[in-house]
Image (cartoon, coloured by chain):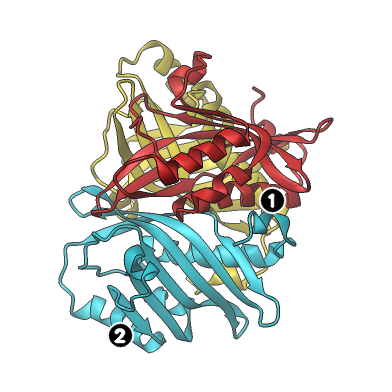
Chain colours: A cyan, B yellow, C red
């Protein structure tokens, strides 16, 4: 990787940066505000959502805690959330780093990486640092709106509460 | 709420976004740097500062941990901080999310929402995640400067150390 | 310090802000991604990197946990990291606040301040909030690229794990 590539290179289009930052931010706010029904709408029809650990990701291992291929699987997951799952109520608080962005000029496909720290707050008031890691995103336009074509959630730790009810 | 409204809609004026982000950021830095005397100056003369929990906020309950109506009450609070309160010395570290912004075109009143995570560091060196939550702001121009007309601090957890000496 | 100076003053050049934010962000991502060899390249040839506590910094005390003067000392530190140090493997996750920026017009030297919260993840999966504090930076152009001329890392707490193997 070229040193300081993103500071030395051409400027990333500011209006596009803003739209991407809005997308990434809205996604987190939707989850934090318990608007889980909005979750699949942040993805393209054929998108991949994959949650894994740093260790597995760096080793190229395909196994993850969650893997959804296509918006249909995401809608099923939301449905299960509402109807089937039994869990202790809780909410999230996402804090995200500023994303690093790049774009493939020939295809207009953007890639983004940003850090996250997620605190989980249980109904009785307990708070804990639930997870830290990074989002590795591929972002495209679909019918005029920016959507995730791929969102890989890479946890820093191998210790993750695998009973993940709400997506990260 | 319209899906992805903020990505689909017109672009928020970049110069105004920067000013709002500066306001929100300066506020946090002032508190983190123990410049509490600056705190009332971030608000308009008639502003409301209200600290509550998510549970109370969503239920529409008016009771909060702190409620100041008007800059005068804020100045009183700062005075009490300097003269009356007895507490174990500590400092804060605020980390804020990127704000979601919208503006009512007819009035030029802006609303903002951003997440926060605040770590509290005691004089003996202990650090703990003091609070997480979101700021819900109404922001206006007063004599050419942006100020908070309303700042509602919504804690995620119902467990908050109610001996809050320094505002969040 | 003038109240709300940064909201009232002239707008900081947006393209320069972006470059500075990229620099600050890339630095954090390089460390989080264990690309420690890139670390000295973020500094000028004669740069100072100084890690201290808030208490020592405010008292003007020169002693810190780490002090490197010049890129040569930084390269030595990276070399020691690869060859000499024995430590339990771990990675960082940096979350940074938005930087406050100012520029001295006559010299084009920029100063920046941003908050940080760093979580440390040990190889066995344990995560802890390793440090909170602020970066106080002086940033200049060197051969067309932005670099740190000075980076002072000010920890909020006096309790810091002094066995700091990887820079913050």
Q: Is residue B132 left or right of residue C68?
A: left
Which residue in the structure is indicated by mark 2? Answer: A76
Q: Position of residue C44 (x, y in %)?
A: 68, 38
The chain to which mark 2 is attached is A
Is C92 placed above or below C1 here?
Answer: below
What chain letter is assigned to the residue under label 1? Answer: C
Q: Quadrant of residue A54?
A: bottom left
Q: Position of residue A121 (x, y in %)?
A: 26, 53
Evaluate whether label 1 is on the same chain as label 2: no
What is the x, y in percent for residue B113?
Answer: 49, 53
Q: Residue C28 location, x and y as percent?
A: 51, 48
Residue most toward the top?
B83
Q: Which mark is residue C19?
A: 1
Choose top left, top right, bottom left or bottom right for residue A37.
bottom left
Residue located at (27% from left, 73% from top): A65
The residue sitting at 30% across, 18% down in the picture is B87
Query: Which residue is outermost to the front?
Result: C83
Q: Nearer the viewer, residue B63 or A20?
A: A20
**Mark 2: secondary structure:** helix
Residue that lies at the very extreme toward the right in this rendered image: C106
Name the quarter where the C terminus of chain B is drawn. top left
- In the image shown, does C94 or A34 lie closer to the viewer? C94
Q: Please report the residue visible at 79 percent of the width from the left and 36 percent of the height from the top.
A: C108
Q: What element does badge 1 sit on?
A: helix
Q: Which mark is residue B132?
A: none
Single out the mark in the foreground, 1 or 2.
Answer: 1
Residue at image position (68%, 52%) is C18
**Is C42 on the left-hand or right-hand side of C84?**
right
Query: Is any atom of residue C64 visible in this view?
Result: yes
């Amino acid at each position: 990787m070229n040193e300081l590539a993103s500071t030395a290179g051409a400027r990333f289009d500011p209006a596009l940066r803003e739209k991407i930052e809005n997308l990434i931010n809205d996604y987190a706010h939707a989850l934090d505000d318990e608007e889980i029904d909005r979750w699949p709408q942040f993805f393209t029809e054929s998108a991949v959502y994959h949650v894994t650990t740093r260790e597995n990701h760096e080793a190229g291992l395909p196994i993850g805690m969650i893997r959804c291929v296509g918006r249909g699987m995401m809608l099923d997951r939301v449905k299960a959330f509402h109807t089937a799952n039994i869990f202790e109520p809780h909410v999230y608080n996402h804090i995200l780093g500023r994303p690093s962005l790049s774009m493939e000029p020939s295809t207009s496909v953007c890639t983004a990486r940003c850090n996250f720290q997620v605190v989980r707050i249980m109904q009785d008031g307990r708070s804990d640092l639930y997870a830290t890691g990074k989002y590795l995103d591929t972002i495209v336009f679909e019918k005029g709106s920016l959507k995730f074509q791929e969102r890989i959630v890479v946890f820093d730790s191998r210790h993750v509460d695998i009973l993940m009810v709400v997506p990260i």
